[in-house]
Image: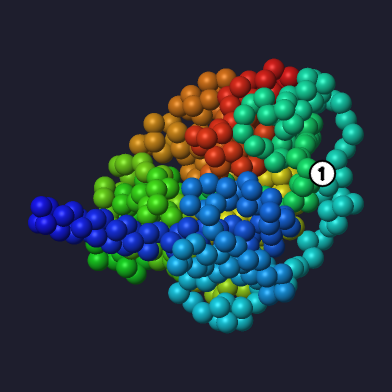
Amino acid sequence: MKKVLYGVLILLGLIVAGGCVYLNSVLPIITGYAAKNLCSNVFVSGREPGSIEAVDLNFSFIKYTKNKVDYEEKSVLSSFLWGKAKAIYREGFGATLIRDIPEETLRRAVYPPDTDPGYMPDSTLWPLGDLIPETDSTGIDKEALAKITEQFIVSHSYNGNPFAFLVIHKGIPVAEAYKPEFDKNTRFLSWSMAKSFLNGIVGVLVREGGIDVNKPVKIDEWQNDERSRITLNELMQMQSGLEWNEDYGSRSDVNLMLFNEGDMSGYAISRPIEYPAGTNWKYSSGTANIISSLIRKEFESDTSCYAFMQDKFFEKIGITNAVFEVDPSGDFVGSSYLYATARDYARFALLYLNDGVFGSERILPEGWVGYTTTPASASGGEYGSLFWLNDSGKFPSAPEDMYMCSGHDGQQIFILPSNDLIVVVLGYSPQPDNVIDFDRLLKDILGTV
């Protein structure tokens, strides 16, 4: 009997020890998620901490974190059990988790001052500015669309928890609505819609002759193995062949990268090869951050890189106040962390709907949108170049030529060329708990055209 009891105690001890080891391994992710997201939403989006904790952080272990917002030093400290994480806000850079690099070092970095875009958004006509023309000439049924908007934002008839909703028809905003607390000036988190913006930045570099997407990328760590053959195109189409786990489980690659690493692209670069490049499609946020690091390496300094993105891309398409956050190493977190207004996301979509031309100026190379929307060979028609496609019929009520930017928790930009239509949805609608019925929403919107 004593031997049995002794054995049970040993087993219980091993279980407790194993549980502690596991918890210790996930605490940086739990506290890091809370600190980073709360810091961004408070200091970049201007939201109230209580609202963020009640909605955005109200899940899994994250909801049990204790969070302290310091408005004077612009930081957030989050704790759970014996784990702690701190995120700081820096002007221009957004919120950054303290990982690997000391806080004092991060705070010494200075973002280049804003340049004059040459226009005033408040007094400039849409789409470059915010003066929306009054017109009923697009041919859309505004009364029916207004009813859909009310059902979506207020009544939640399509499920989910949308914060913002914007519909563009023939280049003109025909529906725009926000939940209380948000408005046209609120910066909303992109999550993975940021990946599509990388496509645009690469496109500008291609047009200027700085990048050839079909050549193998130059990454020192890859030069002596099969990874040396990976092209930028294969990275952009998610067909690099690199090993990656994107399932958002507790210690998946994507969580470790976003909440436990100071050099996110370095973590992704270190992944071994799993398949020959170009033969297997696997969605990877790590791939996006590798692309971010490659973009940064195209410039002599961070100042010139940041200025290029503002001057040659964002401000050219009317985006003057977006924040593309960086990791501690200084790379833009191209997988996940862009903050922009609903109108800014619509402007970005207009650039693609108009074949890379904004207003009267060509921003992207001729043929770039066609390249972007060509299905990656192994994706089954689901994915192009950092954009999702409807070739696979994921949304049966929408035309096959629709393509989209998709983000975690329900962020969507739908681009429908055959209907001259754009639909922007931003909010917090996590799957599978409260997923928006996007197919029905698209069907009803198309019924008003």
Residue shown at 72% from the left, 33% from the top = 153
Q: In the visual, does 273 lie left or right of 200?
A: left
| Quadrant in the rendering for residue 127 | top right
Image label count: 1
| x then y, percent, for residue 173 | 78, 35
Residue shown at 45% from the left, 74% from the top = 100
| Quadrant in the rendering for residue 151 | top right
Q: In the visual, does 395 lie left or right of 348?
A: left
Is residue 327 depicted above or below 425 in this figure?
below
Q: Residue extending furthest top?
A: 447
Q: For the residue carrying disc 1, how many other residues have a C-alpha within 10 Å: few (<14), some (14-19), or many (20+)?
A: some
- Which residue is disc 1 drawn over? 126
| x then y, percent, for residue 407 | 55, 44
Whether residue 139 is visible: no
Q: In the visual, does 110 lie left or right of 81?
A: right
Quadrant in the picture for the C terminus: top right
Comparing 291 with 270, the one in front is 270
Q: Disc 1 residue type? A: Trp
| x then y, percent, for residue 157 | 67, 25
Residue shown at 79% from the left, 65% from the top = 116
Comparing 245 with 423, the one in front is 245
* Circle 1 SS class: loop
Comparing 109 with 370, the one in front is 109
Residue shown at 76% from the left, 28% from the top = 150
| x then y, percent, for residue 374 | 47, 36
Q: Residue extending furthest front?
A: 1
Is residue 392 depicted above or below 17 in this figure?
above
Whether residue 261 is visible: yes
